[in-house]
Amino acid sequence: MSDDATYTVGNQEYPLLEGTIGPKVVDIRALYKDTGMFTYDPGFKSTASCESGLTYIDGHEGVLLHRGYSIEDLSERSSFMETSYLLLNGELPTKFELDDFIYTITRHTMVHEQLKTLYNGFRRDAHPMAIMCGVVGGLSAFYHDSTDITDPEQRKIASHRLIAKMPTIAAMAYKYSIGQPFLYPDNDLSYTGNFLRMTFGVPAEEYDVNPVVERALDRIFILHADHEQNASTSTVRLAGSSGANPFACIAAGIACLWGPAHGGANEAALNMLHEIGHPDRIPEYIARAKDKDDPFRLMGFGHRVYKNYDPRASVMRKTVREVLTSLNVSNPVFDVALQLEEMALNDDYFIEKKLFPNVDFYSGIILSAIGFPTTMFTALFALARTVGWVAQWNEMISDPGQTIGRPRQLYTGPAARDYVPLENRG
Ligand code: CMC
């Protein structure tokens, strides 16, 4: 992991660590002890918060690898279940291992019957992400036999439960919002097919899973499965670093993902495309995005790490066509998206700042063609990202050097001063 090279800060030398691929990392763990100084890096733009073997991103080249396999290969040739196994276990499964994993996940998809009562506490118009935060956090009160995080077997069961129950919980959030009965999972269906049925089926009749839609949604799940140390994953790790309950940690990740700068961007991107409405209005929106006095940003554009085309966006764009063709829907918003992308990619502002479409730019078009309301988009992201969260959480907890995450600060408040009694304050 380390080589002999060092980096000098003041007159102290610090070791350089080297990963398998990617930039070297200056190991400044001893900096404060040696110099009495902290480093300052709000937003972690230059700071590696952990070691991880799960996911690698080269933002300049537009590369995304899970355990060494490219996202293009996985989204084309793998399934969400197989990719989940890969993220959790480090290697692609054999046929037996995959069947066994799918069997296990399928048998954990039901939720405790009493959990249903939690839903009744929410208003019908509650955002599904509000319900997901509450209900997933609530799992900690139900599954006490999988919360001893020092026991690898219990960690594994908690991980399987989370991956398995997320589709059920998300589908129930949707059903609650439209006043339809909850559907129990169907073990004869795939992970994604079962989710589609629990979301769009009704108890009164059979539900036929459309294989093109099932494949497209499964691919969307693969594309969202993990993305190294993004904000929600870092939140899960930070929450978990205190030894907190795994279900509560994932609820923390869901809360973070909800924001429009992160997982909430897919909802915001589609709303923006609808608001633009017609290609003629694109220049007006591009001008607004460039105006420093206007807080408007092109949603689904730009990324903290990708300074090139987000490889997930390319797969997404291809999938939009497949889904629209299969469902035989023409969606004017897709034309707006294509033209907006072309105009932005040829505009100096976006070229200079290396702003490209990200995964969220096209995903909303597919999800709404399938029938999901915009408010469910981020819930689907949370469903898929749960595998990344639990894999990263497991990696952290199994690391013998793991310690509580506790950043430092640059204090800018008043220096120590004397308390002034109330009667003496002007
Ligand atoms: N539209 C217009 N200008 C933008 C945009 C945008 N979408 N994104 C960044 N910029 C500008 C920004 O104003 C800044 O300009 P300047 O240097 O003149 O101040 C420059 O580009 C760099 O932006 P930044 O905000 O410093 O970059 P960041 O790495 O902190 O933010 C981001 C990344 C994703 C929050 C940001 O690009 C953004 O707000 N995009 C829109 C929201 C979005 O699509 N989010 C989904 C991210 S992908 C899914 C996920 O990971 O959750």
Image (cartoon, grey):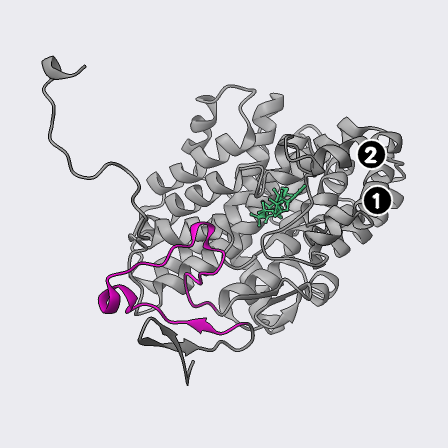
Is residue 230 visible from the viewing direction of this image? yes
Give the amino acid type for the residue marked by disc 1 in the picture.
Answer: Met
Query: Residue 50: percent from the left, percent from the top?
Result: 41, 64
Q: Quadrant of the C terminus?
A: top left
Q: Is residue 30 magenta?
A: yes
Query: Residue 151: percent from the left, percent from the top?
Result: 31, 62
> Magenta span covers which residues?
23-52
Is residue 188 visible from the viewing direction of this image? no
> Ligand 1: does it lie within 8 Å of the C-beta at label 2?
no
Q: Quadrant of the N terminus?
A: bottom left
Residue position marked by numbered label 2 in the rendering: 282
Q: How many marks?
A: 2
Query: Residue 263: percent from the left, percent from the top?
Result: 58, 42
**SS under mark 2:** helix
Residue position marked by numbered label 1 in the rendering: 343
Classify 21 as above or below 281. below
Near-viewer residue (294 or 396): 294
State left or right for residue 89 relative to residue 315.
left
Task: Identify the residue at horizontal 66%, vertical 64% (top origin).
Answer: 60
Task: Identify the residue at horizontal 55%, vertical 52% (top origin).
Answer: 106
Work out how far the residue at label 2 is from the one at label 1, CA to CA, in angstroms.
Answer: 8 Å
Give the amino acid type for the residue marked by disc 2 in the picture.
Answer: Ile
Classify 81 as above or below 414. below
Q: Quadrant of residue 281?
A: top right
Residues at circles 2 and 1 in contact by the CB criterion of under 8 Å: yes
State left or right for residue 426 relative to residue 163.
left
Q: Main secondary structure of the magenta part?
A: loop
Task: Identify the residue at horizontal 37%, vertical 52% (top origin).
Answer: 238
Query: Residue 170: percent from the left, percent from the top?
Result: 56, 37
Near-viewer residue (62 or 78): 62
